[in-house]
Amino acid sequence: MTETFRPESNEQLVEAIRWAASSKTALELVGTQSKQVVGNLMETGGKLDLTGLTGISLYEPEELVLAAGAGCLLNDIEKLLADKNQAFAFEPPDMSHLLGSNSAGTLGGMVASGFAGPRRVQAGGVRDHVLGVRAVSGRGETFKTGGRVVKNVTGYDLPKILTGSWGTLAAMTQVTFKVLPKPETEATLALIGLDNDAAIKAMCAALGTPLGVSGAAHVPGARTLLRLEGIAPSVGARLESLKSELAKFGEMEVLGRDVSRDVWRNIRDVRLIGTEADNPIWRLSVPPSQGAEVLAKIEQSISVNSFFDWGGGLIWLEVLEQDRACAAEIRGAIGAQGGHATLIRASRKSRAGSAVFQPQSATLSMLARRLKDAFDPLSILNPGRMQSSSE
């Protein structure tokens, strides 16, 4: 029977991890389990439930700073920020519908996964907004940015290292964020009927202007969407300029504030694909200029539903085959183009038979191993979630 630990303080967390280290018991780190299905299958002897690590230790709206427990619910924090007309600028997605969860997750899970929404093209990713962390390593040592220096993790940019590490390096107890005011209004310029190549050219052109495009997405066979945000007079003026810049791409229409918000919420939360609960879902990060070519290669051998975000640099794919993840075909299409493919949703059989995260080169694998050894030398925290033992 798997034992579950639910610490409610940093001290209790240290005690739990030190026990696991001394007994060589591997731990699965969990929050609300909103993203539990993402990652390689693991064999662990216990669960470390971090939802008891809550509480807001600092919120200064005028200074645009928030510090809160890693176990705080993301929805609760977003409501708190909204009351002050603020938000996380990187638009964290709520993929609960896609992953079979009833929760958008916790702050710790948001950082550990590193997922950002459409505004990443303008505001940056999760790691660009994390100002500080407090965490406990696999040695049972507490460390934090700007605080006590722990010998084994000295010299690392901790917020960037822990963002996207999927709980494999340390258990976070508190995270400090930069927050920003919510845009007053928005509008979206929709280009009609562009093929994928033309759409990516249009998105790259729009993002290359000084007009502050904060979202650039393309739904194949439908629309190419370009978002502008800010105060109303500015949005209106920039919208007219963007129309002129992109006139050569043909037919276009404008989506007003409310429709625009709904459209981008669906893009952010990946609601344009994945309606069949058993179909595998992939997240591909590629050079934007190569996005159309990568998708075309995939479509030569696989039937998929897809859409582009980040100006063509992010491709979401739904494989229309329930029993095959098609990892070889998808990663083969990326090939020399550069980038990586992550299997976000699949059956246990597919996850067991495919590397969920992009296989690393020998050099990167060696660096990852050194990083793991620095933080978690006994490999007791989410062992194998990102790299299987065979990689």
Image (cartoon, rainbow, N blue to C red):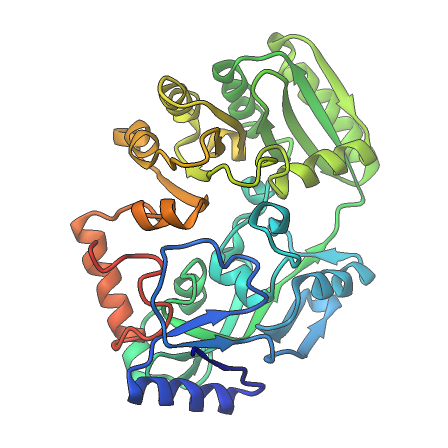
Task: Residue 304: give x, y in percent of width and height.
Answer: 48, 25
Q: Residue 272, image x and y in percent?
A: 62, 33
Total marks in image: 0
Quarter holding residue 321: top left
Above or below, 282 relative to 10 = above
Along the viewing direction, whichever of 30 and 10 lies nearer the viewer: 30
Q: Nearer the viewer, residue 59 or 280?
A: 280
In this orientation, does residue 141 appear? no
- Counting from the top left corner in percent of width and height, residue 153 is at 32, 76
Q: Residue at x 68, y 32 (%)?
A: 227
Instruction: Say which residue appears at 77% left-offset and 27% top-offset.
Output: 237
Left or right of 165 on screen, residue 79: right
> Could you say which is closer to the camera, residue 143 or residue 272?
272
Q: Looking at the rendering, in which quadrant would you find the N terminus?
A: bottom left
Q: Is residue 194 left or right of residue 73?
A: left
Q: Residue at x 38, y 20 (%)?
A: 293
User: Compared with residue 261, is residue 100 higher up or lower down, i.e. above or below?
Assistant: below
- The answer to whether any part of residue 120 appears in the image is yes
Most distant residue in the left direction: 362
- On-image quarter of the C terminus: bottom left
Quadrant housing residue 382: bottom left
